[in-house]
Amino acid sequence: MSYPFSCKNIEELFTEIVSQFNMNSCSVENELIQIISDIHIKATASDKNFWCFIFVYKYPNLRKIALQLTTMFGSTYLCESAFSEMKIIKSKYRIQLTDDHMSSCLRLAISGYVPTYEKYAEDMQCHGSAYKVTP
């Protein structure tokens, strides 16, 4: 599915797509045949940038399938990384964490947010003493 021009048996690819994604077989077959017979896509696309040349309005079913395939692995990665972080946070030394504390720590561990401490320090104002100091 990443680069259909490298597939030797198109019928096998077609039947696999239809069975896995429960889509209309006629429209998927038509789109797959159009892509494979498109000379422009074959000449300009490589296996790395193939999906940049596939437009949604022309091939809606195949774009939908490609998006489903790519999001499947991304969500699995996020889930696995969350469990790894949770295992690190909840070690034998921190076994008495409450659920609220655990969810807060996990949210901080998974988040990609990095605070800019320099900006916060610049925004702080020094407060002078209310008392006059006489020398």
Image (cartoon, rainbow, N blue to C red):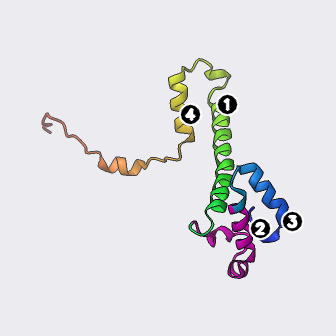
SS under mark 1: helix
In the foreground, 81 or 21: 21
Question: What's the distance in space between the residues labelled 2 and 3, CA to CA?
Answer: 10 Å
Amino acid marked by disc 2: Pro
Q: Is residue 36 left or right of residue 12?
A: left
* Residue that protrudes farthest toward the right in the picture: 8
SS under mark 2: helix
Q: Which residue is mark 3?
A: 9
Residue 95 lies, in percent from the top left, at 63, 20
Labels 4 & 3 near each other (Cβ < 8 A)? no
Quarter of the image where one finds residue 18: bottom right
Task: Please check the rendered image and state whether residue 36 is part of the magenta-colored stretch, yes or no.
Answer: yes
Residue 4 is marked as: 2
Q: Which residue is mark 4?
A: 106
Amino acid marked by disc 1: Lys
SS under mark 3: loop
Q: Is residue 81 left or right of residue 2?
A: left
The stretch in magenta equals 27-56
* Residue at screen point 22% across, 40% down: 127
Residue 135 lies, in percent from the top left, at 15, 39
Question: What's the distance in space between the residues labelled 4 and 3, CA to CA?
Answer: 46 Å
